[in-house]
Image (cartoon, rainbow, N blue to C red):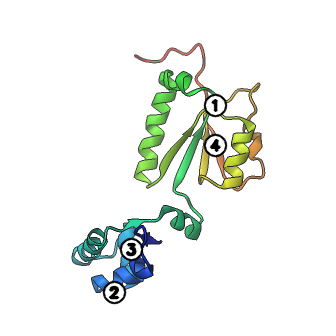
């Protein structure tokens, strides 16, 4: 994990924070990643140094080092105005959002997806997983990710004749 401040030298990295807070770099890493095993005193000392120095987490550096973006994508071929007007989609999105937030992931929503969109998600590794919503047989299925390193899961569509409780 890299901690940076615009225009700063390497003194703001984990080792620099550890030195200023009087703790080990491992302790700083645990605090930054919100891991257990750090006393409240030490946690406060590290957080104070980070606050006083105006430092922030460098998400790009974190993703490069861990090979994880901590981002999941919901991909749909439909336009946003169509999907967000659909109560089925908004309910699914609320449930997905609740779970991803608890797991420490961000949620990326991609509307009007094309086969090129799916190719770019795979090539750029812009997320750690994909949830496909609203794909039909006549729309290019998530076949574009076959052989991909990005796992994908299709979500079921509502039955058009089903009566949803109000």
First in sequence: mark 1 or mark 4? 1
Residue 35 can be seen in this image: no
* Vertical relation: 22 (above or below) 69: below
Mark 3 lies on a secondary structure that is: helix
First in sequence: mark 3 or mark 2? 2
Q: Distance between the residues labelled 3 and 2?
A: 15 Å
Relative to residue 154, is residue 32 drawn left or right? left
Q: Distance between the residues labelled 2 and 4?
A: 45 Å
Residue 13: % across, % down: 42, 78
Report the disc number at residue 19.
2
Residue that appears at 30% across and 72% down: 53
Q: Quadrant of residue 25?
A: bottom left
Report the disc number at residue 153.
4
Residue 86: % across, % down: 51, 21
Q: Mark 3 points at which residue?
A: 30
Residue that appears at 74% across and 28% down: 139
């Amino acid at each position: 994990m890299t901690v940076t401040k615009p225009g700063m030298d390497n003194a703001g990295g984990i080792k620099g924070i550890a030195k200023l807070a009087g703790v080990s770099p491992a302790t700083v890493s645990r605090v930054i990643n919100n891991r257990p095993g750090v006393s409240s005193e030490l946690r406060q000392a590290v957080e104070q140094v980070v606050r006083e120095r105006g430092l922030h987490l460098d998400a790009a550096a974190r993703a490069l080092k861990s090979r994880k973006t901590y981002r999941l994508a919901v991909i749909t071929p439909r336009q946003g105005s169509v999907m967000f007007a659909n109560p089925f989609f908004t309910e699914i999105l609320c449930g997905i959002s609740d779970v991803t937030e608890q797991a420490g992931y961000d949620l990326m929503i991609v509307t009007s997806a094309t086969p090129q969109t799916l190719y770019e998600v795979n090539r750029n590794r812009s997320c750690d997983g994909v949830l496909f919503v609203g794909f039909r047989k006549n729309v290019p299925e998530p076949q574009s990710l076959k052989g991909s390193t990005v796992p994908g899961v299709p979500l079921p569509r509502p039955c058009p004749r089903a009566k949803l409780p109000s």
